[in-house]
Image: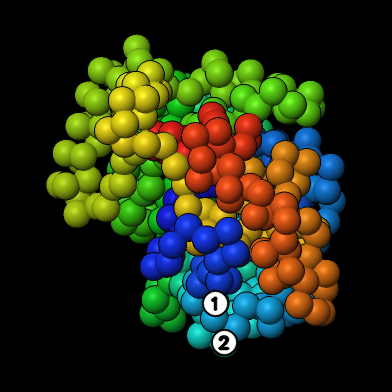
Amino acid sequence: MSRDSATAASLEHPLSLVPPLPRFAQIEPTGRCNLACRMCTVQDRADRVVDQSLADFRAFLDQMPGLETLHLQGLGEPLMNPHFFDMARLASDRGIRVSSNTNLTLLTETRARRCVDCGLASLSVSLDGAEAEVYEAIRRRASFRKVIRNLDRLIAARDAIGSALEVRGVMVLMRGNLEQLPALVRLLHAHGVDELLVQRLSSDLEQADLPPRYFHVRDFVHASELGDADCAKATEIFNQAKDIAAALGFRLHLPRLTNLAHAEHTARSGAARPGCRWPWEGIYLSAAGELMPCCMVASADRASFGTVAKHDAGLLERWHGEAAQAFRQALASDEPPAVCRSCALYRGTF
């Protein structure tokens, strides 16, 4: 997940159980991925072999006439959908700002050119290490060498036509790659990228009724996410990376290092009550057409507002439906839904 999706466009309305359709949406082009990253549940979800058709995508857009910002990505790798570039163009031609994420493993020279002329405004590249050994241990089935080659292809295609496409790196920070951060800043800068978003590995798989097929991901997260004991070391490495970024004129976005115990204590004290506005401010549609509460849920078997009927007004029906209203009511209370209680967004530690 990216902070593009986590920071959906803010709306000025009360916490109604039946809010208007948001101006921000995240739509999955596909539920498939060619990788098996250690911290991702995509290979375990029941509906992962789904590609969204262009007709269905158009029908979803038709139901959101006020949409201003679209993040065209979910758990799957967007470039696996043969209609991805057509989707980006279709949305962009309607005046919608379109962003996406990619693992960049499937980029060819032709696809690089399409990335820069299909209407995409921003493309984030997942890169969790500056060395092959570290990167490939996390992004299983990926080749670090090929990803760097493809990054060069993308930047060359962008620069060749003077495209305004924003390209940035995204790093999921964990114990195993923390020390790679300063080198990754240098690496990205050397290959023509001038921005890196670092986000913490988040433990949001703690719900009591979590399907067992996700247990291996949960166990990896438990072993890999930064904890209290890592904060001093992380602070030192963050400072090194910030110094390098400042010297290079590189934009570096770092996450909070507030530990979870402190966040929970703060919430209990009333100084900063946990919370989340996703189900009011952002649409999340899976490739299979499931309307889900947010980007962090990711799989419909964890929480869903229901399947959106195609080619009709099904989206608004589900957005205002009983499941959505019940979820919002619980989220606004002191007893949030089980899927939210360990979520980094809800707890303010993302």
* Kind of residue sitting beneath label 1: Leu
Give percent across and percent down for residue 33.
73, 48
Of 249 and 13, nearer the camera is: 13
Q: Which residue is drawn at 31% across and 31% down?
A: 270
Give percent across and percent down for residue 245.
22, 45
Which residue is disc 1 drawn over? 67
Q: Helix, strand, or loop for circle 2? A: loop
Give percent across and percent down for residue 150.
55, 56
Q: Is residue 279 above or below residue 230?
A: below
Disc 2 to disc 1, C-alpha distance? 9 Å
Q: Residue 94 carries which label?
A: 2
Of 19 and 25, nearer the camera is: 19
Quadrant hosting residue 297? top right
Quadrant hosting residue 92? bottom right
* Kind of residue sitting beneath label 2: Arg
- In primary-sequence order, the first of circles 2 and 1 is 1
Would you say the residues marked 2 and 1 are in contact, meaning their CB atoms lie under 8 Å apart?
yes
Q: Quadrant of the C terminus?
A: top left
Q: In this view, does 51 lie above or below 158?
A: above
Q: Which mark is residue 25?
A: none
Q: Which residue is drawn at 58% across and 50% down?
A: 328
